[in-house]
Image (cartoon, rainbow, N blue to C red):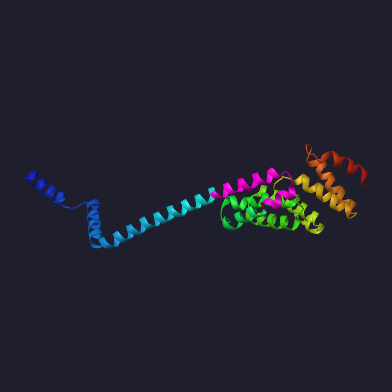
Amino acid sequence: MTEQKVSNERKKELAQIDPFQESLLKAVDYIKKYKKQLILIAGAIVLVAMVFSGVMYSFKKAENTAAILVSHALTKYAATKDPEKGYLETKDDFQTIFTEYANTIAGRLTKVKFAKICYDASKFDESFQYYTQSLEILKDQAQMKNFLLASLGYVSLARKEFEAAEKYFLQIEEGETDLLKDEARFALAMLYDTRNNAAKSKKMYEDIVTDYETSMYRPIALTKVDKIK
């Protein structure tokens, strides 16, 4: 009698659907009900994937083309072996890169190189323009930022804009990274010296002597410290 009772209860348990089976059946019903919508969604996902793939291919192709054009322009510039002639013969090439490939990494980074080309050709206004644009692009990269600030400092000196030069070098001197800090202090010391501000000039030279034992500017700073009263 007991065995028969257990057998009947077991049959009831087996007849019941477990939670997993119930969820599966609901999913099948849902798919049947919304079959058309799901097909459309799947098609849209495939289309988005295809568009994304096409965009990525386009970006990669643009990057490769820009890199090739940059290489050709720099090779042409180097072949002239003359800063002014090199600038004149390549400026249109670089302008094409900046115009047609402005959104590529190669196009953006090349502005730094062209800014130096302009500087070497004494085209200081153009050099300032491209260094400024490069700083805006690369300002979040601390070491690159210091390099560009120093470049803008030297361009400002060439343009006889001494207060602007001081501003750029001070940003390096007061910044967190030590890259080019000794050079910035040396430039500031000379700027203060030309303004007859002996105290500030001496302080910058002393900081170089104290903080940068291996700096190329240290021997000069040592002699300056001894001379400045």
Residue 150 in view, yes or no: no
Instruction: Name the residue located 67 percent from the left edge and 54 percent from the top edge.
Output: 91
**Magenta range:** 65-90
Name the residue nearer the viewer: 5 or 10. 10
Which quadrant holds residue 123? bottom right
Instruction: Name the residue located 23 percent from the left edge and 62 percent from the top edge.
Output: 33
Determine whether 36 is above or below 208 in the image: below
Q: Position of residue 186 (x, y in %)?
A: 81, 46
Instruction: Name the residue located 60 percent from the left edge and 58 percent from the top edge.
Output: 99
Which quadrant holds residue 206? top right
Which quadrant holds residue 152? bottom right
> Is residue 78 part of the magenta span, yes or no?
yes
* Dominant secondary structure of the residues highlighted in magenta in the image: helix
Location of the N terminus (image quadrant):
top left
Give the farthest residue toward the left: 1
Q: Position of residue 226 (x, y in %)?
A: 91, 42
Name the residue nearer the viewer: 187 or 106. 106
> Is residue 106 part of the magenta span, yes or no?
no
